[in-house]
Image (cartoon, rainbow, N blue to C red):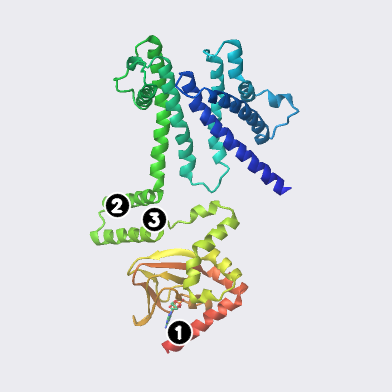
Protein backbone atom coordinates (compact mmCIF):
# COMPACT_ATOMS: atom_id res chain seq x y z
CA UNK A 1 0.00 0.00 0.00
CA UNK A 2 2.77 2.37 1.06
CA UNK A 3 4.81 1.28 -1.96
CA UNK A 4 1.90 2.18 -4.22
CA UNK A 5 1.58 5.64 -2.66
CA UNK A 6 5.31 6.25 -3.08
CA UNK A 7 5.14 5.08 -6.67
CA UNK A 8 2.19 7.41 -7.34
CA UNK A 9 4.06 10.29 -5.72
CA UNK A 10 7.13 9.57 -7.84
CA UNK A 11 4.96 9.45 -10.97
CA UNK A 12 3.28 12.73 -10.12
CA UNK A 13 6.64 14.36 -9.48
CA UNK A 14 8.02 13.13 -12.81
CA UNK A 15 4.93 14.37 -14.63
CA UNK A 16 5.25 17.72 -12.88
CA UNK A 17 8.87 18.02 -14.05
CA UNK A 18 7.73 17.27 -17.63
CA UNK A 19 4.94 19.84 -17.30
CA UNK A 20 7.35 22.55 -16.05
CA UNK A 21 9.96 21.82 -18.73
CA UNK A 22 7.29 21.82 -21.43
CA UNK A 23 5.96 25.15 -20.12
CA UNK A 24 9.47 26.56 -20.36
CA UNK A 25 9.92 25.28 -23.91
CA UNK A 26 6.54 26.67 -24.99
CA UNK A 27 7.31 30.01 -23.36
CA UNK A 28 10.51 30.29 -25.37
CA UNK A 29 9.40 28.68 -28.61
CA UNK A 30 6.00 30.23 -29.32
CA UNK A 31 6.94 33.92 -29.08
CA UNK A 32 9.84 33.24 -31.50
CA UNK A 33 7.46 31.48 -33.85
CA UNK A 34 5.00 34.33 -33.66
CA UNK A 35 7.62 36.94 -34.64
CA UNK A 36 8.61 34.67 -37.52
CA UNK A 37 12.07 33.97 -36.25
CA UNK A 38 13.70 31.57 -38.73
CA UNK A 39 13.12 28.23 -37.03
CA UNK A 40 12.47 24.86 -38.70
CA UNK A 41 8.71 24.88 -39.41
CA UNK A 42 8.43 21.09 -38.91
CA UNK A 43 9.14 21.55 -35.21
CA UNK A 44 5.92 23.55 -34.92
CA UNK A 45 3.93 20.35 -35.22
CA UNK A 46 6.06 18.70 -32.57
CA UNK A 47 5.54 21.62 -30.17
CA UNK A 48 1.79 21.70 -30.90
CA UNK A 49 1.43 17.97 -30.18
CA UNK A 50 3.60 18.36 -27.06
CA UNK A 51 1.37 21.17 -25.77
CA UNK A 52 -1.78 19.07 -26.30
CA UNK A 53 -0.28 16.06 -24.51
CA UNK A 54 1.20 18.10 -21.66
CA UNK A 55 -2.11 19.93 -21.19
CA UNK A 56 -3.80 16.57 -20.69
CA UNK A 57 -1.07 15.75 -18.17
CA UNK A 58 -1.76 19.08 -16.45
CA UNK A 59 -5.44 18.24 -16.15
CA UNK A 60 -4.53 14.83 -14.69
CA UNK A 61 -2.12 16.49 -12.22
CA UNK A 62 -4.82 18.98 -11.24
CA UNK A 63 -7.06 16.09 -10.16
CA UNK A 64 -4.38 13.95 -8.53
CA UNK A 65 -2.49 16.68 -6.68
CA UNK A 66 -5.66 18.25 -5.32
CA UNK A 67 -7.27 14.84 -4.74
CA UNK A 68 -10.41 15.82 -6.62
CA UNK A 69 -13.18 13.51 -7.65
CA UNK A 70 -13.34 12.93 -11.44
CA UNK A 71 -17.07 12.25 -11.18
CA UNK A 72 -17.92 15.64 -9.70
CA UNK A 73 -18.76 18.34 -12.20
CA UNK A 74 -17.45 21.06 -9.88
CA UNK A 75 -13.92 19.56 -10.12
CA UNK A 76 -13.95 20.17 -13.88
CA UNK A 77 -15.40 23.65 -13.72
CA UNK A 78 -12.18 25.35 -12.68
CA UNK A 79 -10.65 28.23 -14.59
CA UNK A 80 -7.27 26.45 -14.86
CA UNK A 81 -8.88 23.27 -16.25
CA UNK A 82 -10.74 25.28 -18.90
CA UNK A 83 -7.47 26.95 -19.96
CA UNK A 84 -5.77 23.55 -20.16
CA UNK A 85 -8.62 22.20 -22.28
CA UNK A 86 -8.10 25.08 -24.72
CA UNK A 87 -4.42 24.05 -24.99
CA UNK A 88 -5.38 20.40 -25.57
CA UNK A 89 -6.99 21.45 -28.88
CA UNK A 90 -4.73 21.06 -31.96
CA UNK A 91 -4.60 24.83 -32.38
CA UNK A 92 -1.96 24.88 -35.13
CA UNK A 93 -3.95 22.43 -37.24
CA UNK A 94 -7.19 24.35 -36.65
CA UNK A 95 -5.48 27.62 -37.53
CA UNK A 96 -4.16 26.26 -40.81
CA UNK A 97 -7.50 24.72 -41.72
CA UNK A 98 -9.52 27.82 -40.93
CA UNK A 99 -7.24 30.81 -41.57
CA UNK A 100 -4.18 29.54 -43.46
CA UNK A 101 -0.57 29.33 -42.31
CA UNK A 102 0.16 33.07 -42.18
CA UNK A 103 -2.36 33.58 -39.42
CA UNK A 104 -0.96 33.35 -35.87
CA UNK A 105 -3.57 34.49 -33.30
CA UNK A 106 -5.02 31.06 -32.50
CA UNK A 107 -1.62 29.46 -31.87
CA UNK A 108 -0.96 32.27 -29.41
CA UNK A 109 -3.48 30.62 -27.09
CA UNK A 110 -0.96 27.82 -26.57
CA UNK A 111 1.05 30.29 -24.50
CA UNK A 112 -1.54 29.71 -21.76
CA UNK A 113 0.21 26.45 -20.94
CA UNK A 114 3.42 28.36 -20.11
CA UNK A 115 1.74 29.53 -16.87
CA UNK A 116 2.54 26.12 -15.32
CA UNK A 117 6.09 27.39 -14.81
CA UNK A 118 4.77 28.86 -11.55
CA UNK A 119 4.38 25.30 -10.28
CA UNK A 120 8.14 25.17 -9.75
CA UNK A 121 7.58 26.68 -6.29
CA UNK A 122 5.10 24.08 -5.02
CA UNK A 123 7.14 21.38 -6.76
CA UNK A 124 10.29 22.35 -4.84
CA UNK A 125 8.33 22.39 -1.57
CA UNK A 126 8.21 18.60 -1.69
CA UNK A 127 11.98 18.30 -1.34
CA UNK A 128 12.73 18.91 2.30
CA UNK A 129 16.47 18.42 1.90
CA UNK A 130 16.91 21.41 -0.42
CA UNK A 131 18.80 24.45 0.79
CA UNK A 132 16.58 27.56 1.25
CA UNK A 133 18.70 29.32 -1.37
CA UNK A 134 17.45 26.85 -4.01
CA UNK A 135 13.80 27.58 -3.16
CA UNK A 136 14.43 31.24 -3.70
CA UNK A 137 16.73 31.20 -6.70
CA UNK A 138 15.30 28.38 -8.84
CA UNK A 139 11.95 30.09 -9.61
CA UNK A 140 13.72 33.37 -10.35
CA UNK A 141 16.27 31.72 -12.61
CA UNK A 142 13.51 30.01 -14.58
CA UNK A 143 11.08 32.88 -14.82
CA UNK A 144 13.25 35.94 -15.33
CA UNK A 145 14.88 34.87 -18.62
CA UNK A 146 11.46 33.82 -19.87
CA UNK A 147 9.93 37.19 -19.02
CA UNK A 148 12.80 39.06 -20.71
CA UNK A 149 12.38 36.83 -23.78
CA UNK A 150 8.61 37.27 -24.06
CA UNK A 151 8.87 41.05 -23.65
CA UNK A 152 11.64 41.16 -26.30
CA UNK A 153 9.51 39.16 -28.74
CA UNK A 154 6.56 41.49 -28.11
CA UNK A 155 8.85 44.42 -28.89
CA UNK A 156 9.96 42.83 -32.18
CA UNK A 157 6.30 42.11 -32.97
CA UNK A 158 5.61 45.84 -32.63
CA UNK A 159 8.48 46.79 -34.96
CA UNK A 160 11.44 47.14 -32.53
CA UNK A 161 10.99 50.91 -32.04
CA UNK A 162 13.78 53.16 -33.34
CA UNK A 163 16.04 50.10 -33.84
CA UNK A 164 13.65 48.93 -36.58
CA UNK A 165 13.56 45.55 -38.28
CA UNK A 166 16.87 43.95 -39.23
CA UNK A 167 17.53 41.48 -42.03
CA UNK A 168 19.72 39.62 -39.55
CA UNK A 169 17.00 38.14 -37.32
CA UNK A 170 19.48 37.07 -34.66
CA UNK A 171 20.85 40.61 -34.33
CA UNK A 172 17.29 41.98 -34.23
CA UNK A 173 16.50 39.54 -31.43
CA UNK A 174 19.64 40.47 -29.46
CA UNK A 175 18.78 44.17 -29.74
CA UNK A 176 15.25 43.42 -28.49
CA UNK A 177 16.63 41.42 -25.56
CA UNK A 178 18.87 44.37 -24.72
CA UNK A 179 15.86 46.74 -24.89
CA UNK A 180 13.73 44.38 -22.83
CA UNK A 181 16.37 43.99 -20.16
CA UNK A 182 17.12 47.69 -19.79
CA UNK A 183 13.42 48.61 -19.80
CA UNK A 184 12.51 46.00 -17.24
CA UNK A 185 15.41 46.72 -14.90
CA UNK A 186 15.62 50.49 -15.27
CA UNK A 187 13.69 52.82 -17.54
CA UNK A 188 15.95 52.00 -20.48
CA UNK A 189 18.88 54.02 -21.82
CA UNK A 190 16.95 55.79 -24.56
CA UNK A 191 19.24 54.53 -27.35
CA UNK A 192 16.37 52.35 -28.54
CA UNK A 193 13.06 54.06 -27.96
CA UNK A 194 9.40 53.83 -28.94
CA UNK A 195 8.29 55.38 -32.24
CA UNK A 196 4.67 54.47 -32.79
CA UNK A 197 1.79 54.95 -30.30
CA UNK A 198 1.51 51.17 -29.90
CA UNK A 199 5.21 50.93 -29.01
CA UNK A 200 4.86 53.83 -26.54
CA UNK A 201 1.93 52.18 -24.77
CA UNK A 202 3.82 48.85 -24.73
CA UNK A 203 6.88 50.60 -23.31
CA UNK A 204 4.85 52.19 -20.47
CA UNK A 205 3.23 48.86 -19.71
CA UNK A 206 6.61 47.05 -19.57
CA UNK A 207 8.08 49.73 -17.32
CA UNK A 208 5.25 49.28 -14.85
CA UNK A 209 5.75 45.50 -14.92
CA UNK A 210 9.51 46.07 -14.55
CA UNK A 211 9.08 48.08 -11.36
CA UNK A 212 7.13 45.23 -9.74
CA UNK A 213 9.11 42.32 -11.11
CA UNK A 214 12.57 43.69 -10.50
CA UNK A 215 11.57 45.05 -7.11
CA UNK A 216 10.62 41.47 -6.31
CA UNK A 217 13.85 40.07 -7.76
CA UNK A 218 16.06 42.59 -6.02
CA UNK A 219 14.40 42.09 -2.64
CA UNK A 220 14.78 38.33 -3.03
CA UNK A 221 18.42 38.55 -4.02
CA UNK A 222 19.18 41.08 -1.28
CA UNK A 223 17.56 38.98 1.44
CA UNK A 224 19.29 35.93 0.01
CA UNK A 225 22.69 37.56 0.22
CA UNK A 226 22.12 38.76 3.75
CA UNK A 227 20.93 35.28 4.79
CA UNK A 228 23.88 33.54 3.21
CA UNK A 229 25.99 34.67 6.11
CA UNK A 230 23.20 34.90 8.66
CA UNK A 231 25.40 33.59 11.48
CA UNK A 232 28.00 36.34 10.96
CA UNK A 233 25.24 38.98 10.64
CA UNK A 234 23.67 37.81 13.88
CA UNK A 235 27.03 37.81 15.63
CA UNK A 236 27.98 41.26 14.30
CA UNK A 237 24.62 42.58 15.43
CA UNK A 238 25.21 41.32 18.97
CA UNK A 239 28.73 42.71 18.97
CA UNK A 240 27.52 46.11 17.73
CA UNK A 241 24.87 46.29 20.44
CA UNK A 242 27.44 45.37 23.07
CA UNK A 243 29.87 48.02 21.76
CA UNK A 244 27.16 50.70 21.95
CA UNK A 245 26.26 49.56 25.45
CA UNK A 246 29.90 49.72 26.60
CA UNK A 247 30.41 53.12 24.99
CA UNK A 248 27.30 54.57 26.65
CA UNK A 249 28.47 53.27 30.06
CA UNK A 250 32.11 54.40 29.59
CA UNK A 251 33.42 50.91 30.30
CA UNK A 252 37.21 50.86 30.92
CA UNK A 253 39.36 49.63 28.02
CA UNK A 254 40.69 46.46 29.72
CA UNK A 255 37.14 45.30 30.46
CA UNK A 256 36.12 46.16 26.91
CA UNK A 257 38.98 44.01 25.65
CA UNK A 258 37.77 41.10 27.76
CA UNK A 259 34.23 41.43 26.42
CA UNK A 260 35.53 41.52 22.84
CA UNK A 261 37.70 38.50 23.61
CA UNK A 262 34.60 36.64 24.79
CA UNK A 263 32.77 37.46 21.57
CA UNK A 264 35.78 36.32 19.55
CA UNK A 265 35.76 33.03 21.44
CA UNK A 266 32.02 32.66 20.85
CA UNK A 267 32.48 33.23 17.14
CA UNK A 268 35.46 30.90 16.79
CA UNK A 269 33.86 28.01 18.63
CA UNK A 270 30.13 28.40 18.10
CA UNK A 271 29.80 30.68 15.05
CA UNK A 272 28.25 33.17 17.48
CA UNK A 273 25.36 30.87 18.45
CA UNK A 274 25.47 29.50 21.96
CA UNK A 275 21.78 29.86 22.54
CA UNK A 276 19.75 26.66 22.45
CA UNK A 277 16.37 28.25 23.07
CA UNK A 278 15.42 27.74 19.42
CA UNK A 279 15.61 23.98 19.96
CA UNK A 280 12.61 24.16 22.28
CA UNK A 281 10.41 24.75 19.22
CA UNK A 282 11.26 21.28 17.91
CA UNK A 283 9.42 18.05 18.72
CA UNK A 284 10.98 16.23 21.72
CA UNK A 285 12.33 13.34 19.66
CA UNK A 286 14.09 15.58 17.12
CA UNK A 287 15.29 17.77 20.00
CA UNK A 288 16.85 14.83 21.78
CA UNK A 289 18.55 13.58 18.58
CA UNK A 290 19.92 17.04 17.94
CA UNK A 291 21.16 17.43 21.50
CA UNK A 292 22.76 14.02 21.35
CA UNK A 293 24.60 15.03 18.20
CA UNK A 294 25.65 18.46 19.51
CA UNK A 295 26.90 17.06 22.82
CA UNK A 296 28.58 14.05 21.22
CA UNK A 297 32.02 15.61 21.48
CA UNK A 298 31.77 15.84 25.28
CA UNK A 299 30.93 12.14 25.56
CA UNK A 300 34.14 11.39 23.69
CA UNK A 301 36.25 13.73 25.80
CA UNK A 302 35.09 12.80 29.29
CA UNK A 303 36.46 9.38 30.32
CA UNK A 304 33.52 9.03 32.75
CA UNK A 305 31.16 8.88 29.76
CA UNK A 306 33.22 6.46 27.72
CA UNK A 307 31.91 3.22 29.17
CA UNK A 308 28.42 4.59 29.83
CA UNK A 309 25.41 2.91 28.29
CA UNK A 310 23.57 4.51 25.38
CA UNK A 311 20.49 5.11 27.60
CA UNK A 312 22.51 6.91 30.24
CA UNK A 313 24.18 9.08 27.60
CA UNK A 314 20.89 9.95 25.93
CA UNK A 315 19.41 10.99 29.27
CA UNK A 316 22.50 12.95 30.20
CA UNK A 317 22.59 14.83 26.90
CA UNK A 318 19.18 16.25 27.74
CA UNK A 319 20.37 17.55 31.06
CA UNK A 320 23.75 19.05 30.12
CA UNK A 321 23.86 22.81 29.59
CA UNK A 322 26.81 24.55 27.92
CA UNK A 323 28.47 27.50 29.66
CA UNK A 324 31.48 29.62 28.83
CA UNK A 325 33.84 31.13 31.42
CA UNK A 326 36.44 33.76 30.63
CA UNK A 327 40.06 33.64 31.89
CA UNK A 328 40.29 34.64 35.57
CA UNK A 329 36.57 34.07 36.22
CA UNK A 330 35.58 32.23 39.39
CA UNK A 331 33.32 29.32 38.45
CA UNK A 332 32.38 28.93 42.10
CA UNK A 333 33.88 29.79 45.49
CA UNK A 334 34.83 27.58 48.43
CA UNK A 335 32.05 27.12 51.02
CA UNK A 336 29.38 28.17 48.55
CA UNK A 337 26.30 25.95 48.26
CA UNK A 338 26.79 23.62 45.30
CA UNK A 339 24.02 23.64 42.72
CA UNK A 340 25.71 21.80 39.83
CA UNK A 341 28.75 19.85 38.66
CA UNK A 342 30.86 20.66 35.60
CA UNK A 343 32.46 18.78 32.70
CA UNK A 344 35.33 20.42 30.83
CA UNK A 345 34.87 20.48 27.06
CA UNK A 346 37.87 22.74 26.50
CA UNK A 347 40.07 25.00 28.61
CA UNK A 348 41.88 24.76 31.92
CA UNK A 349 40.39 25.05 35.41
CA UNK A 350 42.41 25.50 38.58
CA UNK A 351 41.17 24.13 41.92
CA UNK A 352 42.28 26.16 44.96
CA UNK A 353 41.51 25.38 48.61
CA UNK A 354 40.35 27.85 51.30
CA UNK A 355 44.02 28.74 52.10
CA UNK A 356 44.51 29.68 48.45
CA UNK A 357 46.70 26.61 47.97
CA UNK A 358 46.75 25.04 44.54
CA UNK A 359 45.10 21.60 44.61
CA UNK A 360 44.81 20.60 40.98
CA UNK A 361 44.74 21.78 37.39
CA UNK A 362 41.94 20.17 35.45
CA UNK A 363 41.90 19.95 31.66
CA UNK A 364 39.66 18.87 28.82
CA UNK A 365 37.64 15.78 29.72
CA UNK A 366 37.83 16.22 33.52
CA UNK A 367 34.90 17.02 35.81
CA UNK A 368 34.60 18.92 39.08
CA UNK A 369 32.04 20.21 41.56
CA UNK A 370 30.74 16.68 42.12
CA UNK A 371 31.56 16.46 45.88
CA UNK A 372 29.00 19.06 46.94
CA UNK A 373 26.31 17.10 45.11
CA UNK A 374 27.28 13.64 46.31
CA UNK A 375 27.79 14.55 49.96
CA UNK A 376 25.26 17.36 50.02
CA UNK A 377 27.79 19.76 51.49
CA UNK A 378 29.22 23.24 50.60
CA UNK A 379 32.00 23.56 48.01
CA UNK A 380 35.27 22.12 49.34
CA UNK A 381 37.39 24.38 47.10
CA UNK A 382 37.30 27.27 44.63
CA UNK A 383 37.29 26.62 40.87
CA UNK A 384 38.96 29.26 38.69
CA UNK A 385 38.97 29.43 34.89
CA UNK A 386 42.56 29.87 33.70
CA UNK A 387 41.71 30.15 30.02
CA UNK A 388 38.45 30.43 28.08
CA UNK A 389 36.56 27.41 29.34
CA UNK A 390 33.75 25.66 27.53
CA UNK A 391 32.01 23.68 30.22
CA UNK A 392 28.89 21.57 30.41
CA UNK A 393 26.95 21.87 33.64
CA UNK A 394 24.73 19.23 35.20
CA UNK A 395 22.31 20.67 37.75
CA UNK A 396 21.77 19.08 41.17
CA UNK A 397 18.24 17.93 40.24
CA UNK A 398 19.49 16.38 37.00
CA UNK A 399 22.43 14.82 38.84
CA UNK A 400 20.07 13.23 41.38
CA UNK A 401 17.79 12.05 38.61
CA UNK A 402 20.62 10.46 36.63
CA UNK A 403 22.38 8.91 39.63
CA UNK A 404 19.18 7.33 40.96
CA UNK A 405 18.38 5.88 37.54
CA UNK A 406 21.96 4.79 36.83
CA UNK A 407 23.77 3.86 40.08
CA UNK A 408 26.90 2.91 38.08
CA UNK A 409 27.33 6.60 37.21
CA UNK A 410 27.38 7.50 40.91
CA UNK A 411 29.82 4.67 41.67
CA UNK A 412 32.20 5.88 39.02
CA UNK A 413 32.14 9.42 40.42
CA UNK A 414 32.69 8.10 43.94
CA UNK A 415 35.82 6.29 42.74
CA UNK A 416 37.20 9.55 41.33
CA UNK A 417 36.42 11.36 44.62
CA UNK A 418 38.26 8.62 46.46
CA UNK A 419 41.32 9.09 44.22
CA UNK A 420 41.21 12.87 44.66
CA UNK A 421 40.97 12.82 48.44
CA UNK A 422 43.69 10.12 48.60
CA UNK A 423 46.06 12.26 46.49
CA UNK A 424 45.25 15.38 48.49
CA UNK A 425 45.96 13.65 51.81
P1 LIG B 1 33.12 20.42 45.28
O1 LIG B 1 33.46 20.22 46.68
O2 LIG B 1 31.68 20.40 44.88
O3 LIG B 1 33.73 21.85 44.80
C1 LIG B 1 35.12 21.95 44.68
C2 LIG B 1 35.57 20.91 43.72
O4 LIG B 1 36.95 20.83 43.47
C3 LIG B 1 35.28 19.54 44.30
O5 LIG B 1 33.90 19.37 44.36
C4 LIG B 1 36.05 18.66 43.39
O6 LIG B 1 35.37 18.41 42.22
C5 LIG B 1 37.24 19.51 43.11
N1 LIG B 1 38.39 19.09 43.93
C6 LIG B 1 38.56 19.24 45.24
N2 LIG B 1 39.76 18.73 45.62
C7 LIG B 1 40.34 18.26 44.51
C8 LIG B 1 41.58 17.61 44.22
N3 LIG B 1 42.48 17.36 45.20
N4 LIG B 1 41.85 17.27 42.96
C9 LIG B 1 40.99 17.54 41.99
N5 LIG B 1 39.80 18.14 42.19
C10 LIG B 1 39.47 18.49 43.42
**Residue on which the image places disc 3:** 272
Q: Which residue is at a point 45% across and 22% down the rendered structure image?
A: 38
Residue drawn at point x = 53 percent, y = 12 percent: 103
User: How many residues crowd around disc 3 within 10 Å: few (fewer than 14), some, or many (20 or more)?
Assistant: many
Query: Which one is in front in this view, the residue at disc 3 or the one at disc 2?
Result: 3
Q: Where, by quadrant of the figure, is residue 159 drawn?
A: top left
Q: Is mark 1 within 8 Å of ligand 1?
A: yes
Tell me the tag on residue 280: none
* Image quarter of residue 124: top right
Q: Secondary structure at mark 3?
A: loop
| Circle 1 residue | 420
Report ligand 1 position as a quadrant: bottom left
Q: Is residue 410 above or below residue 215?
A: below
Mark 1–mark 3 distance (CA, rounded to whole Å): 36 Å
Which element carries disc 1, helix, strand or loop?
helix
What count of labels does the image hold? Answer: 3
The Cα–Cα distance between marks 1 and 2, rounded to whole angstroms, is 43 Å
Q: Which mark is residue 243?
A: 2
- Disc with the residue nearer the chain's start (1 vs 2): 2
Using the image as rendered, state which of residue 348 and residue 62 is in the foreground: 62
Q: Which of the 4 image quarters holds residue 145?
A: top left
Amino acid sequence: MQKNTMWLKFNLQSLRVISILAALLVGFWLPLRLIQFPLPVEYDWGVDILISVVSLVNIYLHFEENQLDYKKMSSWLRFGVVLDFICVLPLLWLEQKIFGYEHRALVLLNLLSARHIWRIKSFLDQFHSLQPVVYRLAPLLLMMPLLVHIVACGWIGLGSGTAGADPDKMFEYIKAIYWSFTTLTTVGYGDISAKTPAQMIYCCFIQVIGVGVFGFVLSNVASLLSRMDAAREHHMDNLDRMETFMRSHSIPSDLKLRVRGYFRHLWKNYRGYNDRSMLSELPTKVQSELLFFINKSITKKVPLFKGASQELLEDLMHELQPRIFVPGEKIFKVNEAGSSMYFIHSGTVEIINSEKKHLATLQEGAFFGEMALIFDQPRSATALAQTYCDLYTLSKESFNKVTSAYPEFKEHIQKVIHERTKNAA
